[in-house]
Image: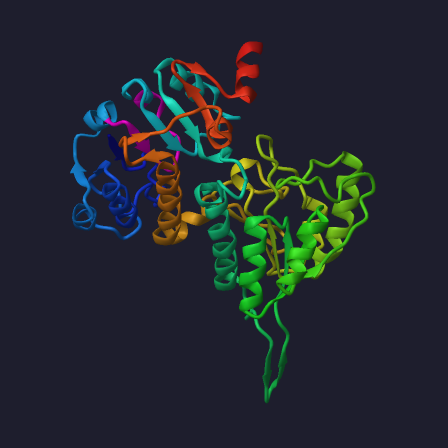
Amino acid sequence: MIIFAPKETDSSETRAALTPITVKRLVDIGLEVEVESGIGSGCDHSDIEYSESGAKIITDRGSSLSTADFIFRVRKPPVEEISILKEGAMHLSFLDPFNDSESLHAMASSGTTAVSLEMIPRTTLAQKMDALSSQANIAGYTAVIYSAEKLNKILSMMMTPAGTISPAKYFILGIGVAGLQAIATAKRLGARVTAFDVRQEALEQAESLGAKALRIDLGGDSSETGQVYAKELTPEQLDKQREEQAKVCEDSDVVITTAKVFGRKSPILVTKDVIERMKPGSMIIDLAAESGGNVEGTVLDQEVVTENGVSIVGIGNFEGRVARHSSQVFSANLGNFVEHFWDQEENSFKFNLDDEILSGCVLTHAGKIVHERFLEESTEE
């Protein structure tokens, strides 16, 4: 069976879906691996490295797309390439299924087995293939490094003969994977960190990393849902949350927002009136920019400076700023997925939609939409 990893079609995407290390792992279990020439140019991997790891270097993209049994990508495919995929091929990438029904239906029509990496279950068993988490982890780190470079201050406290330099103050909104890594990175660099999340367990995790937890009594059943994702708040709860957060924002040098509600537009957590009260030279990094943003005034892929001198950073794909390592873990996630279901004795992929991992992330199969969440939407249409 053949795995093909093409170059990404988005010119701003620096990550690669396969790295030489993962290529070797897949070749060793009996798979043939093909990669498009230049796939690793954005993450410092040469064609020679891929070839030495056992991959075949391809220049005829269309031919490989039409013959491969597995297609590995980072981003969703161009719609025009879906129709040329081999019938029954398995396509793995971020698919943005809640916002792109056209691609979803095209994959069903072409007979593609579409695996949405966003839909990998957040379970212990599936953790090794959870690309959403691996990329969020790197985004949290990179956001802090970016702010450290751009901020007109140093991050750590210094005692000098000329006086004491106070540490920079960071406020992390949303303590998921990205938020926890942002906390850990800012603390390692010597910053003073405050963090907020609606989940009690997340606040405790932040405190274990040395952050000060902002505890806000939102009432109701908002503190803990038993889920990985934070529960969506009511308008009243959001208003109270913003009010308490505003006080911390005013005193912070850097605010990093990470709150995403999966499948929906991100909630606004930092409003214009709060930004107007922040200090000149302070910065807000909106890691939810690609899904609508947590900050009023965020512009995707731009840094906006307000009239009072606050920078609102809406850069998307912070992971791609450190493409070598983000590609490493992304590629490992895909390799782990295939290895988990690979039967070496029969040299085949064990496909069973009753499996909890596959039932969670497979959207289309055998010419139709099979995921319950999207099957309902398709029926309504």
Give 42 or 114, whichever is nearer the viewer: 114
Compared with 281, 35 (above or below) is above
Furthest residue to the bottom?
Answer: 161
The residue located at (16%, 49%) in the rendering is 52
User: Is residue 334 found left or right of 7 in the rendered image?
Assistant: right
Q: Is residue 75 magenta?
A: yes
Give 89 or 163, whichever is nearer the viewer: 89
Residue 249: x %, y % from top left: 69, 55
Quarter where residue 116 is shown: top left
Quarter where residue 60 is shown: top left
Furthest residue to the front?
Answer: 345
Count of numbered labels shown in the rendering: 0
Residue 105 appears in the picture as rendered: yes
Compared with 67, 153 (above or below) is below
| The C terminus: image quadrant | top right
Q: Give the colour scheme of this rendering.
A: rainbow
Q: Is residue 331 magenta?
A: no
The residue located at (56%, 16%) in the rendering is 377
Residue 264: x %, y % from top left: 60, 31
The residue located at (48%, 32%) in the rendering is 357
Residue 381 appears in the picture as rendered: no
Residue 219: x %, y % from top left: 83, 42
The residue located at (49%, 35%) in the rendering is 120
| The N terminus: image quadrant | top left
Give 1 or 196, whichever is nearer the viewer: 1
Q: Look at the image and give the residue range highlighted in magenta.
A: 68-81
Residue 62: x %, y % from top left: 22, 25
Give 1 or 342, whichever is nearer the viewer: 342
User: Is residue 49 found left or right of 339 in the rendered image?
Assistant: left
Compared with 254, 345 (above or below) is above
